[in-house]
Amino acid sequence: MGKEIPRSSVEKALFSATAFLVIFNTFTIPFALPKLTRYLGAPFLPSSTRAYREVLDRIPQFHSVDTVKTLRMVDIGSGDGRLVSEAAKAGFQSSLGIEMNPWLALLSKWRLRKMKNSKILWGNAWDKVDQVTEYAPDVITFYGRPGQGLMNKFGTMVEQVGDASGKTIIVVSNKFHIPNWHLRQIAQVGDFIVYKLHSNRE
């Protein structure tokens, strides 16, 4: 007969495995899984820094301005704050990220700790439309996903912000098209689809 494994060793192994799974799920599920239906959102799948820089470099062209120094940007579902950080480095007047994942929001705040003109809000973007409107952004970026009317909801939110602010807004969607916005599309930079929502006061 084989040698019997001590019960204490088995218990320790099971405890270690359980602890590992709890820790693993705690830190990975919020990054990888889509949000619950109530919080319509997308999983965390960051683009490269180079891709962000390419689209940010063309914002003056899209907005018909010489510099981004007078522009304000909002990133909906800002993940680890990479795009908000790059906007600050590019010279935007200010940049704001909204992220509902607490771990990513904390990571973003740490990333932006030395950037005075950048800020991260932790929470559900759909509950912060008033704050986005008050911010009066010139550029709104978003990473969405198909299904559950998410892209339609995003388009409606941006229209509300534009109507309230009276500003022309450059809207950048990462990978996915906003339904019925094809006439507003002005460019595509890599995976980024660029739209121009004209001011209702023009």
Image (cartoon, grey):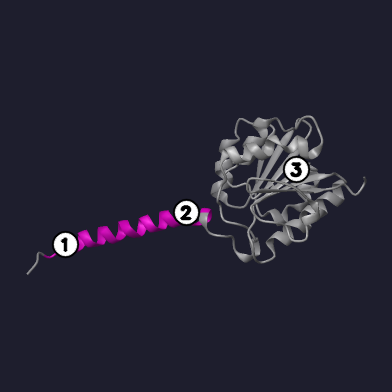
Marks 3 and 1, the one that precedes in the sequence: 1
**Foreground of the two, 121 or 93:** 93
Q: At x 70% / y 56%, what residue is drawn?
A: 177
Q: Which residue is mark 2?
A: 28
Q: Secondary structure at mark 3?
A: strand
Q: Start and end of the magenta stretch? A: 4-31
Name above or below for residue 125 compared with residue 169: below
Q: Position of residue 14 (x, y in %)?
A: 29, 61
Distance, label 3 to label 1, CA atoms, is 63 Å
Name above or below for residue 43 compared with residue 47: below
Give the amino acid type for the residue marked by disc 2 in the picture. Thr
Which mark is on residue 173?
A: none
Q: Which residue is mark 1?
A: 6
Q: Which residue is mark 3?
A: 139
Name above or below for residue 35 compared with residue 46: below
Give the amino acid type for the residue marked by disc 1 in the picture. Pro
